[in-house]
Amino acid sequence: MKKIYHLSSCSTNQRILKEVKPGSDVVLQDIKEEGIDEKTLDFLKEKTGSYEALFSKRAMKFRSMGLNEMNLSEADYKKYMLEEYTFLKRPFMINENEVFIGNSKNTVAEAVKSFNN
């Protein structure tokens, strides 16, 4: 599977897509329009080791819902990401068995290499 989960209204995600230059064989999915499914989230968790690694604590709702005051479990992280796209670190880029999550410079550079081989 070659797929990039992104937020089309995010300028950072738009910049990353331009850098990665996904080919026509890569499916682009706007997570605001169509959230991530449980099967894919479980796959990503297997690759990263935890749901917490996929969770964005920078999301505005993280503080407004008081989640920053709670001791969240792995099940909680999963539940919130399935319910609300804003809790997903983005973009999620899947190139077969390689997974790239987030927008750090190193992550994007590795994704560019992977998608352009």
Image (cartoon, rainbow, N blue to C red):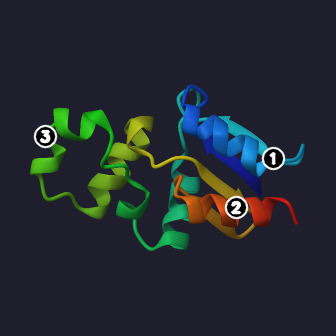
Left/right of residue 25 with respect to residue 27 in the rendered view: right
Residue at 40 percent of width and 45 percent of height: 81
**Quarter of the view holding residue 30:** top right
**Which quadrant of the rendered structure holds the C terminus?**
bottom right
Q: Quadrant of residue 59?
A: top left
Name the amino acid type tagged 3: Gly
Quarter placement of the N terminus: bottom right
- Up/down of 38 relative to 115, above or below: above
For label 1, count other residues whose C-alpha is less than 10 Å away and answer few (under 14), some (14-19) or many (20+). Answer: some
Mark 2, Cα crowd under 10 Å, few <14 / some 14-19 / many 20+, is many
Which residue is drawn at the image coordinates 27% and 53% (left, top)? 76
- Give the image location of residue 2, x and y in percent: 77, 55
* Foreground label between 3 and 2: 2
Q: Earlier in the sequence, mark 3 or mark 1?
A: 1
How far from the left and from the top, in percent, is residue 110? 68, 67
Q: What residue does disc 3 label?
A: 66
Tag 2: residue type? Ala
| Amino acid type for the residue under numbered disc 1 | Lys
Q: Are marks 3 and 2 in contact (CB under 8 Å)?
A: no
Disc 3 element: loop
Q: Give the mark, 1 or 2, whose residue is nearer the N terminus.
A: 1
Indicate which label's residue lies in the foreground, 3 or 1.
1
Could you say where residue 95 lies in the image, as x and y percent from the top left? 75, 61
Q: Give the residue at mark 2.
A: 111
Looking at the rendered structure, the secondary structure element under dot 2 is helix
Q: Position of residue 93 (x, y in %)?
A: 65, 54
Number of numbered tags placed on the structure image: 3
Mark 1 = which residue?
Answer: 21
Distance from label 3 to label 2 (Cα)?
33 Å
- Residue at point 39%, 61% (across, down): 51
